[in-house]
Image (cartoon, coloured by chain):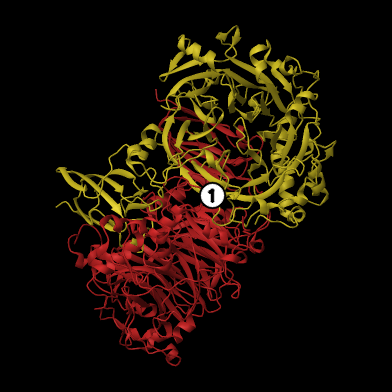
Chain colours: A yellow, B red
């Protein structure tokens, strides 16, 4: 499946419907869509007038507006405003020396012309050489990809370059195959620490680093739905902590303080009353949003910083001083139209040592037990006369932000503006006007969302509306004038509408520079149809050869909805093969140590073991109403010989990897005979591996 | 990843640990393991004495017995018995004409010599030609594979030959990405019809047929854990019915009456009191197990048949008269040792018309509202003087059973015996002694579990202990003497310990004969390590060229734990691209039809819609304690433009495909501000797609 001898046919092979829908989702004014319109698509049949490459909003019928889809989302909003009149951003100077380009008025949405994609974009070579990137049966992949599962609540582990899904790690949801949410520890984590929600919305999985490189210890991921942060232990590939973050609705971005994962940051998105307990419901001016700093060891929230506006994504500088978050709704509106009034929003640069100083000096308000520091524009808190949070104005709604591997720049993607904004990190501490830290603002394409790096000075930015990935040179962008397309080296179509993208080890100081995955939100009819809920499409590119350009290797359908990923070289992860009983909080039950104890009239404690093909107790007799605590160990020592104990009609399945011990407490409230069985097929006599649980009825 | 220029290296590349564990799991006496023992594996270091290829049980230490793993499971059990002394089975005659082979004593476990695999087994050619079987980016697969998800409770849709997972279909578990268990209809299905369990154990997905070919209408699948049967609508790829089967614990096999899916059968595994309400807990003689016949349209249980012993897997004859189930524990013991006393078990052949006659004649006992017909050996019920259930004795614990595409034979795999048993289906109705319907009993290998067909007269049987798939000629097996290895054409290693296998359209009258998937229970270190819980390994073979033999194309890691699959040609499934509002039970809410109605002091009904990038109501004000019913439609008409409404901290996420309408009822019990948002990334202004839910506090 990785060889495509005639990849150039791939584009022409698109069906009419594909073209149709692609057109509906693309910017109605860009060159490609104009082309499809000429093919007689819906847009063309009775479509909007195209003037100078732009859709004239007032000519659209309601129906056309509906069809015009994503592009409309952008264009209609823009057109509703009387004037775009974007701010003139003064670009600062790179290291106060390189500077260069005096910067003129930045182009806004209206009047911009989209950058034409190189229609060839090396497609003729795509996948032709994919044999090099194949993984034969029995061979190992080179990388672990950790993808968020979006509103499944999970993390997915994918091998690269095969793009095979190796494992799921349940995080915010109970999951029976791994017994997550079935045993006492994980169900307590979900119920008590986690707030009792049955799902989550994972977006940004980040692997812990030491000295700006992956250390393979932990993975952190946010829950946007319920404002939580979770930690996954990468020795056991299992979620081991969940923190329900107070004063905060919608932890969106999730990132770390580098170089050594000193803090984990949760970027609060939605503005709500703090605490959100019914107060100030009708007073949006009183709402707030916070950045939360979480201790990676204890998972306690150390402090929060309240800011103006909604926040979105984040990333940390490589030296640990600055943390950056994008945002939207600087208007602090509560409806879409209120949020769309202003033409600018901000990148917020958090001065972490200054915030610690404020906390230590007691300059905070304690809310819900957490010190909340004032980081709004009006705050009087400062560090050397400069605010602890510096607001860098950008065109409206900057979305993704990521720090270059060399630590020099934070690059924010424009989303509603075709540019990316390059912020000089060293400059932030030095300049009087935060705007002076902006050292580049190249025009990349329509709907730039996220940016990844190859370690060779190239940035790769997803273009949601253009359905492309643009490769560009960020030092060239610093040298070029704002609004220049010159830094763009190459664009490659993706299928379709990409959100995040991630390159191998892009978040470290030393990206590997070979693979890139574009996480595309729509797949249309790229795969066999599977009903109205489509998979997404995670596309793998080889980016290791700058002369050959980006090479499409593979399409991977993906269950909704991975948002983001981290890609880690296999040598940096050292998973355990079996459990180390010393690592486990509850006592192992060895063979011979099994016990059945009736503690009192209605309390029973059972300690037992499992091995091929039996449980310590082939039979257990209980009385209706007994409170039963069952602890069970898998006494196998051979890796991959997994057992479970599934109790029919009692809604329990404990998964037991070798040397693992799990515990569950349940009430024997149904009289009858219940054949507990092993749900992991473990031997030829697997079916016979059972324990008969007799629950004698109350007389 | 499908090309392996030097596939023969794949075997030699196994690490020591792999060999070690392979040895632990393989039959300690077979040729391959003897070889690894010589390599200095654990088994060899202080391992059991090998005599004539067999492990001498009494020489094993407890530790060695533990290490000896799966093989021990089999061998130790065998060795505990004083004598295997298997019954002499008289083979009947093929169509009362072809017959042939007078059959001698059937070999049991002890004393058997394993069949040596062809160590070459075409491995040198494996995957070399896999380019032919690749699916380039943008190309479609040829087949849908529907895999059960085992104790995840789900169904997985995989494309063949790419082996990409296209979609998950939640069946017995709530799943937030699709909103399953979040909206009113699916949560009622799980809670009320489904019995309120939060998980299930899906084993056998079967696609409905018309005239012995797939009609693409429904997929049925069992829940072994909680005794249920579910139906998936293959227009929408969504579970649309769950039946909680009474009088039954552990619905294992799931199959259909052919040629036209007249009934769906649930094969009851565990013996329990009927009903299992606390009666007869301590009286195993009173336990029973039943075959359940379910109406595919209404999903009602039409009738059940009580039988002797535990049942296991099942399959239906092509003409609709006979249904077959394997079984174990004919002893009706309640411990593993009691279940292991007898050397024979039975294939049960159910005479479906005769059972209907008994039901219509009132010859049943009604239990839990279902007519239960007596199909035990002692039953007086009969059809033309022959029992309505005929018990065909086989070596102990026959496991899989499947009917050949020509409808001539039902082939049961031996599990604890190295043979498969070939039963002549026409003969069953005619012979006085059911044993006379056995027309072949070839020796296939160690641990035969399941058998699939290519439509060219070949059977493919998984060998769990040998970690192989054996290809054999079933007509040759009818001609050969019982116990002959002659019918075996080829064996191919799999990695490792296969359970089910499935060939393309193997369950129809016309298998496609090109692809076969072996669902291997253990992957060992076949993939990058991901902690103590390993993926399984679903291996794809090309079987279309009998001269070239079986060719290994691909390894696919698989989240635990697919048990079985059906493979359907893409032309036989016609999924909907958007919802047809006529197909949906609740009313669609068009733009302009939105409404907010306060029905009384504490009841609110909201009808609204969603489209890019807004909800009908940007704001909704509720009072603490309100009972809220929210109905919402996605008014998009473009396929793949999916929305959702996620309500933070209210634990709700309704997924909304285009033209879909969902409803949820919740109590507004938390005062505060809750930003409902769209969790499907739908446009550049996706983040702004929100509705502010204000829950005003009780004063």
Q: Which picture quadrant has residue A183?
A: top left
Q: Residue at x 52, y 44 (%)?
A: A156
Q: Which picture quadrant has residue A68?
A: top right
Left or right of A62 on screen, residue B117: left
Q: Is residue A524 visible?
A: no
**The one of A423 and B5 positioned closer to us in this rendering:** B5
Q: Is residue B25 visible?
A: yes
Residue at the far top in the pictured view: A385
Where does the image place residue A584, in percent across and percent down from the top left?
34, 38
> Can you say whether A142 is above or below A227 in the image?
below
> Can you say whether B325 is above or below B175 in the image?
below
Where does the image place residue A72, in percent across and percent down from the top left?
72, 38
> Can you say whether A511 is above or below A673 in the image?
above
Mark 1, other Cα within 10 Å: few <14 / some 14–19 / many ≥20: many
Quarter of the image for the N terminus of chain B: give it. bottom right
Where does the image place residue B402, in percent across and percent down from the top left?
44, 73
Q: Residue at x 76, y 56 (%)?
A: A9
Q: What is the chain identity of the residue bearing mark 1?
A: A
Quarter of the image for the C terminus of chain B: give it. top left
**The one of A233 and A390 positioned closer to us in this rendering:** A233
Where does the image place residue A142, in percent across and percent down from the top left?
58, 45
């Amino acid at each position: 499946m990785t060889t495509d001898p005639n990849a150039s046919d791939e584009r022409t092979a698109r069906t009419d419907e594909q073209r149709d829908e692609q057109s509906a989702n693309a910017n109605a004014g860009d060159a490609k869509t104009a082309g499809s319109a000429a093919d007689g698509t819906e847009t063309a049949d009775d479509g909007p007038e195209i003037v100078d490459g732009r859709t004239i909003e007032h000519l659209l019928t309601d129906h056309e507006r509906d069809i015009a889809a994503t592009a409309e989302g952008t264009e209609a909003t823009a057109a509703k405003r009387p004037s775009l009149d974007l701010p003139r951003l003064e670009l600062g100077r790179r290291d106060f020396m390189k500077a260069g380009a005096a910067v003129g008025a930045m182009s806004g949405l209206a009047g911009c012309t989209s950058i034409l994609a190189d229609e060839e974009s090396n497609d003729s070579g795509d996948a032709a050489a994919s044999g090099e990137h194949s993984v034969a049966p029995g061979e190992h992949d080179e990388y672990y990809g950790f993808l968020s599962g979006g509103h499944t609540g999970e993390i997915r582990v994918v091998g690269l370059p095969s793009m095979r899904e190796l494992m799921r790690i349940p995080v915010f949801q109970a999951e029976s195959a791994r017994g997550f949410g079935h045993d006492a520890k994980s169900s307590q984590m979900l119920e008590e620490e986690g707030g009792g929600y049955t799902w989550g919305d994972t977006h940004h999985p980040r692997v812990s680093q030491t000295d700006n490189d992956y250390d393979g210890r932990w993975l952190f991921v946010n829950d946007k739905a319920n404002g939580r942060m979770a930690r996954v232990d990468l020795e056991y590939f299992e979620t081991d902590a969940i923190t329900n973050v107070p004063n905060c609705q919608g932890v969106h971005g999730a990132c770390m303080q580098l170089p050594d994962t000193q803090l984990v940051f949760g970027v609060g998105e939605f503005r709500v009353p703090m605490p959100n307990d019914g107060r100030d419901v009708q007073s949006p001016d009183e709402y707030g949003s916070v950045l939360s700093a979480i201790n990676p060891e204890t998972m306690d929230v150390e402090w929060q910083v309240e800011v103006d506006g909604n926040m979105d994504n984040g990333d940390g500088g490589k030296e640990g001083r600055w943390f950056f978050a994008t945002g939207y709704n600087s208007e602090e509106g509560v409806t879409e139209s209120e949020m769309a009034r202003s033409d600018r929003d901000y990148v917020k640069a958090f001065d972490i040592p200054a915030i610690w100083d404020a906390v230590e000096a007691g300059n905070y308000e304690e809310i819900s037990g957490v010190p909340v520091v004032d980081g709004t524009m009006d705050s009087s808190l400062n560090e050397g006369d400069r605010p602890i949070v510096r607001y860098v104005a950008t065109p409206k709604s900057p979305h993704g932000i990521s720090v270059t591997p060399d630590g020099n720049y934070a690059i924010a993607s424009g989303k509603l503006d075709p540019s990316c904004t390059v912020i000089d990190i060293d400059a932030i501490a030095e300049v009087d006007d935060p705007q002076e830290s902006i050292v580049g603002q190249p025009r990349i394409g329509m709907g730039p969302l996220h940016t990844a790096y190859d370690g060779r000075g190239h940035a790769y930015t997803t273009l949601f509306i253009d359905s492309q990935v643009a490769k560009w040179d960020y030092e060239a962008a610093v040298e070029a004038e704002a609004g220049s397309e010159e830094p763009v080296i190459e664009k490659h179509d993706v299928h379709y509408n990409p959100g995040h993208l991630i390159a191998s080890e892009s978040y470290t100081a030393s990206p590997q520079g070979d693979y890139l995955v574009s996480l595309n939100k729509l797949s249309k009819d790229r795969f066999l149809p599977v009903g109205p809920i489509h998979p997404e499409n995670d596309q793998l590119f080889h980016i290791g050869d700058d002369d050959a350009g980006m090479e499409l290797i593979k399409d991977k359908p993906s269950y909704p909805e991975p948002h983001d990923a981290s890609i880690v070289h296999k040598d940096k992860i050292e998973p355990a093969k079996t459990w180390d009983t010393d690592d486990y909080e509850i006592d192992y039950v060895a063979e011979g140590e099994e016990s059945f104890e009736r503690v009192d009239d209605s309390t029973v404690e059972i300690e037992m073991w499992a091995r091929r093909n039996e449980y310590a107790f082939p039979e257990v007799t209980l009385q209706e109403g007994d409170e039963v605590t069952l602890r069970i160990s898998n006494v196998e020592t051979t890796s991959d010989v997994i057992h479970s104990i599934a109790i029919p009609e009692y809604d329990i399945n404990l998964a037991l990897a070798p040397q693992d011990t799990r515990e569950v407490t349940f009430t024997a409230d149904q009289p009858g005979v219940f054949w507990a069985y092993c749900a992991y097929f473990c031997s030829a006599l697997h079916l016979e591996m059972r324990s008969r649980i007799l629950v004698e009825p109350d007389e």
